[in-house]
Image (spheres, helix red, strand yellow):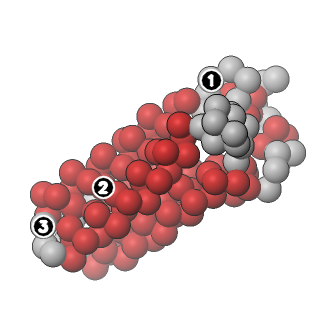
Amino acid sequence: MSLAPLLEAAPAIPLHAVAAMAAFVLGLVQLAAPKGTLPHRTLGWIWVGLMAFVAASSFWIHQIRLVGPWSPIHLLSIFTLVMLVSGVMAARRHNVRGHKITMISIFFGALVIAGLFTFVPGRIMYQVVFGG
């Protein structure tokens, strides 16, 4: 395991990766912790900020180019940003069920599933964990 491939990448990539890892860990805390409390709301805003940064920073990453500089992951980023707004609005409307479904879906779709794709051979996180 070596952080060299990540640290040698364009600046957007390590920033994106660190924010995604922080959002993953914080998301696990949020899933396990009591809901509706002040810490849940505070950590939730931090998580939303991290996820917004992760999604937005992806627009400066162009390693997979399928349509010009873009790839399907960029569609996921747009969808994530829209769903973050939807999840926050659900919470503000006290729609607990809608908020829960939206935020858990973002966690698993944008962090867990998309995160697993970063470990495909040839990708930077594969090189970090398994070597070049």
Between the C-alphas of marks 3 and 2, the distance is 12 Å
Quarter of the C terminus within the rendering: top right
Q: Amino acid at mark 1?
A: Val
Around disc 2, counting alpha carbons within 10 Å, would you say few (fewer than 14), some (14 to 19), or many (20 or more)? many
Badge 2 element: helix
| Residue 112, image quadrant | top left
Residue 43 shown left or right of residue 130 in the figure: left
Q: Earlier in the sequence, mark 3 or mark 2?
A: 3
Which of the labelled discs sits on residue 103, or is there none? 2
Q: Depth check: 27 or 101 in front?
A: 101
Between the C-alphas of marks 1 and 3, the distance is 37 Å
| Residue located beneath label 3 in the image | 95
Q: Position of residue 56 (x, y in %)?
A: 57, 60
Q: Position of residue 105 (x, y in %)?
A: 30, 46
Do the CB atoms of the residues marked 1 and 3 lie less than 8 Å apart?
A: no
Marker count (numbered): 3
Q: Earlier in the sequence, mark 1 or mark 3?
A: 3
* Vertical order, 86 against 72 (above or below): below
Quarter of the N terminus within the rendering: top right
| Residue located beneath label 1 in the image | 120
Q: Position of residue 96 (x, y in %)?
A: 14, 64
